[in-house]
Image (cartoon, helix red, strand yellow):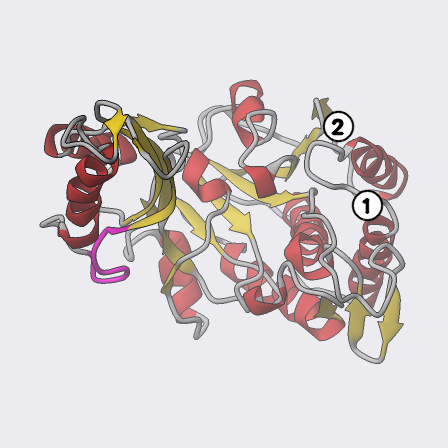
Amino acid sequence: MNISEPNVKQAVELLKVLINTPSLSREEGDATDRLQMFIERGAPVQCEVHRHLNNLWCVAPGYDAGRPTLLLDAHIDTVKPVSGWSKHPFTPIVEGDRIYGLGSNDDGASLVTLLQVFYKICESKQNYNTIFLASAEEEVSGKNGIEAVIPHLPPISCAIIGEPTSMHPAVAEKGLMVLDCVAEGVSGHAARNEGVNAIYNAMQDIEWFRNHKFPKSSELFGDVKMTVTQISAGTQHNVIPDSCSYVVDIRSNERYSNSELLEIIEKSVKSKVAARSTRLNSSAISLEHPLVKRAVELGRKPYGSPTLSNQALLTVPTLKMGPGDTTRSHTANEFVLVSEIREGMELFCKMLDGLKI
């Protein structure tokens, strides 16, 4: 599977189209329309385009239920432009090797790269099926994104999640769980020795969150990290507060599911604890998985990623990898290099050609 300059040119042209079409999370409809039109009019191979909500996917011709299936996923949505842009975020600007625009690095480069790689896989015979997916709502972990699509797809064996990793394989990813906690007390007058101060009750539990160490540590991520980030209590200076609410941000390692952590926490603190969601679990793929081994053979370095992606919402082995630099994501004057897109295509083709899953 050889990458040609026309492949790179087509990827860049599509990236310009996507930058020029605002696709904020939950508002990806226009961008999905234009991507569908781009594929239906210009795909070098015959592949049927499917759509559910603002998600779009293609299955490589010759699908065989007896073979494993590889999913190539990249998200089509972007965050809102931050302040500080000196260029127009929705106007693609090419300056030398750089392409500026909102979503150019996160996640347009991975999307256009994986689409071209998908075309190349379609042109050659492989021992696995391939599905290309442009997913919605990734930036907000929305339920109308990849989670909504998976039931419509054939069974998936493993996946590459396209994200800007400088084409190094992220073999694990931290999870996220946010807790809303409430410590209760009894109101009274602050001038008298009455009531039960909910703030003091909360302080005991907050101290537990600050100091508790879960026994299972991770070679990639270290310990589970719990941080109290917000607190609110009291109505006025002379009233003992009967309620104190606070928020805890928890970053899990791959040794615990969020549900396991929640169960331990509920047994350890007196506050009422409610998880906003337990969906965003930490994930990891074995270093012996064929995807990882092939990446390592090509000189790429496995690492653990602190940022969330669609990896958190899939139950199959996933490898996060793509062109671009994660430090450019969500920044003013976001950009990606054409040379990074070219390198991404070449490396993915070498990884996937002849792969045995």
Main secondary structure type of the part rendered in magenta:
loop
Q: Which residues are magenta?
A: 218-226
Would residue 52 be seen by someone viewing this image from the given angle?
Answer: yes
Looking at the picture, how far across and down is residue 8, in whole percent? 78, 64
Q: Amino acid at mark 1?
A: Pro
The picture places residue 6, in percent across and down from the top left corner, at 84, 63
The amino acid type found where label 2 is placed reads Glu
- Between 306 and 192, the one nearer to me in the picture: 192
Residue bearing the label numbered 2: 48
Residue sitting at 79 percent across and 31 percent down? 29
Which quarter shows the N terminus? bottom right
Q: Are marks 2 and 1 in contact (CB under 8 Å)?
A: no
Q: Residue furthest front?
A: 191
Residue underneath mark 1 = 44
On screen, residue 241 above or below 186:
below
* Left or right position of 195 against 55: left
Q: Residue 200, percent across and down?
A: 19, 40
Q: Position of residue 259 (x, y in %)?
A: 25, 29
